[in-house]
């Protein structure tokens, strides 16, 4: 997942790797953390949610300004959103991946 935009010029990256590690980068500062077995299972479950197949590839409010843009790559597809649409499965996935970014 890549998070960009906003007034402050956010650029964040989170990658869940198959070995159970999570690569996170904010402002060029990379960190690699290991998930617990339960955390890895939870993330994989979110990625495997069948309702994600119904999420449109592009859900952006083109009239909005200063919104964060989320680009996710999973299951062979790319999804872009600014979270302005009600997509619960996608929101759960974004929230779970965002938890691996530092809290500021």
Image (tube, grey):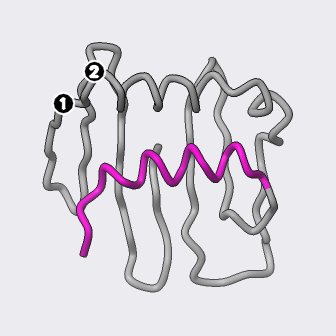
On residue 20, which mark appears?
2
Asked if 59 appears above or below 103 in the picture, the reply is above
The residue most toward the front is 38
The disc, 1 or 2, on the residue closer to the chain's N-terminal end is 2
Q: Are marks 1 and 2 in contact (CB under 8 Å)?
A: yes
Q: Which residue is mark 1?
A: 34
Name the side, left or right, on which 70 lies relative to 14.
right
Q: Secondary structure at mark 2?
A: loop
Does the segment drawn in magenta span residue 103?
yes
Q: For the point 35% across and 27% down, which residue is it?
A: 38
Q: Position of residue 86 (x, y in %)?
A: 81, 60
- What separation in Å lies between label 1 and label 2 (alpha carbons)? 6 Å
Q: For the point 86% across and 34% down, which residue is it?
A: 54
Does the segment drawn in magenta span residue 48?
no
Q: Badge 1 local density, few (<14 within 10 Å), some, or many (20+)? A: some
Name the side, left or right, on which 11 lies relative to 76.
left
Q: Position of residue 41 (x, y in %)?
A: 43, 22
Q: Quadrant of the C terminus?
A: bottom left
Asked if 77 appears above or below 18 in the picture, the reply is below
- The magenta region covers 87-104
Q: Position of residue 5 (x, y in %)?
A: 49, 70
């Amino acid at each position: 997942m890549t998070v960009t935009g906003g007034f402050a010029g956010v650029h964040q990256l989170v990658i869940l790797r198959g070995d159970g590690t999570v690569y996170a980068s904010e402002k060029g500062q990379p960190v690699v953390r290991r998930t617990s077995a339960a955390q890895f299972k939870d993330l994989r479950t979110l990625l495997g949610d069948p309702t994600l197949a119904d999420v449109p590839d592009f859900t952006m409010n083109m009239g909005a300004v200063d919104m964060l843009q989320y680009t996710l790559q999973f299951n062979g597809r790319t999804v872009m959103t600014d979270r302005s649409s009600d997509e619960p499965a996608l929101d759960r996935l974004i929230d779970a991946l965002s938890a691996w970014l530092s809290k500021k």
